[in-house]
Each structure stands twice: as structure tokens, then as C-alpha cells.
Amino acid sequence: MNEKKKITIACVNTALHEVGGETRRLRNLYLKINGPDHRFLIAYCSRQKEAVEKFFLDGGVNPQDLFWFPTSKRTFFIPLVMNLRKLYITEKVDIMHSFFLHSDILGFISALLAGVKIRISNVEGTFLLDERYGVNKAKQCCYSFINRMIRPFFFRTVAVSAGLKEELVQDFGLRRDKIEVINIGIEIPSKDMIHREINGKAAKVIANAARFSKDKGLEYLLRAAPGVIREIPEARFVLAGTGDEEASLKKMVKDLGIESKVFFPGWVKDMVQFMRDMDVFVMTSIREGCPMTLMEALSFAKPAVAFNVPGPQEMIVNGENGFLVEPFDVQQLSAVIVQACKDPERARQFGENGRRRAEERFSVEIEAKKMKSLYSRALSEGFDDSKTKE
């Protein structure tokens, strides 16, 4: 009897430059997908190789399944394409699964050269890279043009939220039947892990964990802070992360006169303790795909507040497990944070509802199961490049 062939997937991410949500997400997928029926390879570029590699290896990724490629201009485009091609051939890759547009382009070209016919693309919050990622207008136009050329040659484009799927259809002209929605999944903590003694007083710790960039909208959280502090003098704000906007955010804190109330711990290593210590999680992102930290806060039974934008809209049911606030409305943001802090019983109920929603929709087991199903369907149906223009 012939043994069932193991499916080999090469996950390609050419911009894994820091330890954060994306590294955690890929590690979680690796641990859930890699096994008797699937081999999940991680092929990545990173300017923080040592930190990213250590994160993966310490988290249980087999060194034989981890492939790093340099990112200098001299060794990047053509050498990277050829190195990826060699990887696909050497490791007998069945499916190339790329994450983000830059990876789509490089992954597609290398897969085409290696004869890998099944290509899958994962799209998250930022589809077209911009100046924040070191991509000028000329490069943006180039990426957009190349994307429209190669997109029909992917078996499926995976969107991490229904809102993002609609954006891809409406703004970028992608075929609806070629887009599959698979939410990002997280490890759901046990109830013992989330347990925390509540003393019945008004909540004090309002927290956020994010990359410090313009699209995360952290300035609006800081502008809302004085209104919260007036109502709850013992309130503290904890903004975990680093990024280009760090200096300007710290200056804003000083200008607002709230230096004693706002803390910047950097990237937190112990996310479990970070989640346990907070009372309310606030996300002020202007644009999101399927934010992991928001899902994690819900899984830790924390009431959540977020701007009413795609992504958070699918996680927060307004008035049931948190609050959705109109983007940029600082007064409303301040008011609902106060509400969430001053009513411990309602906060507890929000937390229970949020945890239930995370368990039902956003576990990594659910994401991995859907990914495995997509891989199996892709190989079963096959993909013929010559039939892409229908």
C-alpha cells in the first residue's frame, strides 16, 4: 500500500523585520500545521535575523524547516528569487504560500521558475506598501501594476477579514470567487491563565500593544487620556511597543502633562502577564485586517474599545463585548473608556462575551484547519495557468 504523500508548503515572508504579531502568527501556524500530513517551511527575510530566528527556534520550530535569506540591495531581488527557486526544488515544495504583496511578487516569480503551480497569497491589513514601509510613490505604482498582472495566477487570495475581502474586490478589482476569508487565529489561554483578583474598585489600567506607526492611531488614545484621568485619577495608560512614532508620542505625553500616567514598556516579552494586568484594552488603529492583540485581549476576557473600522468590527459587538467608537472622535473614545472602567460588573460580562467570541471564531486551531482544507482543495483541483483569463 502506498503511503499518503506529505504536502510541503513554503511560507514566504520577505519583510519579517521584527518580533511581533506576524512572527507569533507564523509560529502558531507552524505548530498546528506541521505534522504527519504537512511540512510547513518558513522562508523569510529579516533585518533582525538573530531575534526572529531565536523566537522561532525557542517556540518549537525545527531548524530544518527555517530558511533565512539576506536583504541587502546587492543580494535581494534576483538572487533572492533564485534562492527561493532552489529551495522549492530541493525541498520538493507543492504549494507556495506568500504573505503580503512584496512576498507575493517574489514568491510568484520564484515559484513560476521552479514549476510550483499552486500559489496562495495571504493579504492582511496593508495591501499596497507605502512610505511607512520605505516604498515611494513610483514603487507603489510599480507594485500595483505587477500585482494586477500576477494576481490571476494565484489559486486563491486569502483575506483575514470579510471587510478586507470587500476592499480587495471594490478597490483592487479582485474576483470575489478567488478570495477566501480565513481569520487569523490565536492560542486561547486556559481560564487559569487569565484569572486575576478583582477588588471591585474602578478599573485603572488601560493598555494597548502595537507597532508605533501612524496607522495605529495612538495619538488619539493619548488625546483621550486627560478626559479619562479627570474622571478616574488613578487611571494608568500602558502603551507597549516601539516604532517610528515613539519620539513624537512621548513628546505628546509631555505636552499634555500626563507623564506620570503614561508608561512605555517597549515590546513586552511576557504577553500573558501583560494581558492579565490590564483592565481595558483600547485599539485606535485607523486601518486593521485581523488584529491579533485585540483577539488576545478578548481571549483574556478583557473589555475592548476600538475605532469602528474593518477588522475590529468583526471582533467587537458594540455593547456586548466592548465598544466601537467613530474614528478620530476623541471625546467619545474618552467617554466609553470611562464607562468600561467604572462599571466592573458590565466589564466582567463584556469580558466573558469577548472570550466566548474568541473561542468560537479566532482560535489558531480553526485557522489551521481552514488552511489545511485550502491546501488539500488546491492540490485536488489543481491549477492551470493557461486558464486564468476567463
Image: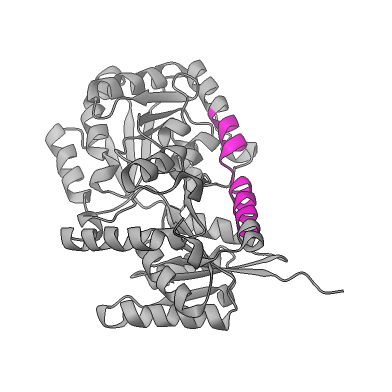
- Identity of the residue furthest to the right in this view: 1
Does residue 231 sit above or below 205 in this rendering?
above
Place of residue 176 in the rendered image (x, y in percent of width and height, measured from the top left): 46, 44
How has the structure been colored for display? one colour
Magenta-colored segment: predominant secondary structure: helix
Q: Residue at x 50, y 46 (%)?
A: 177
Seen at 34% across and 39% down, the residue is 238
In the rendered image, the vertical position of residue 128 relative to residue 330, given as above or below: below
Seen as rendered, the residue at the extreme front is 390
In the rendered structure, does residue 269 fall within the stretch colored magenta? no
**Quarter that holds the N terminus:** bottom right
How many numbered dots are placed on residues in this image? 0
In the image, 107 versus 65, the foreground residue is 107
Residue 15 visible in the picture: no
The answer to whether residue 367 is magenta is yes
Quadrant of the rendered structure where residue 139 is?
A: bottom left
Residue ID at (15%, 32%): 256
Q: Nearer the viewer, residue 142 or 293?
A: 142
Q: Which residues are magenta?
A: 354-376
Locate residue 170 relative to residue 33 in the image: left or right.
left
| Residue at left offset 37%, top offset 47% | 125
Residue 76: image quadrant is bottom left
Q: Is residue 279 above or below residue 213?
A: above
Q: Position of residue 93 (x, y in %)?
A: 58, 74
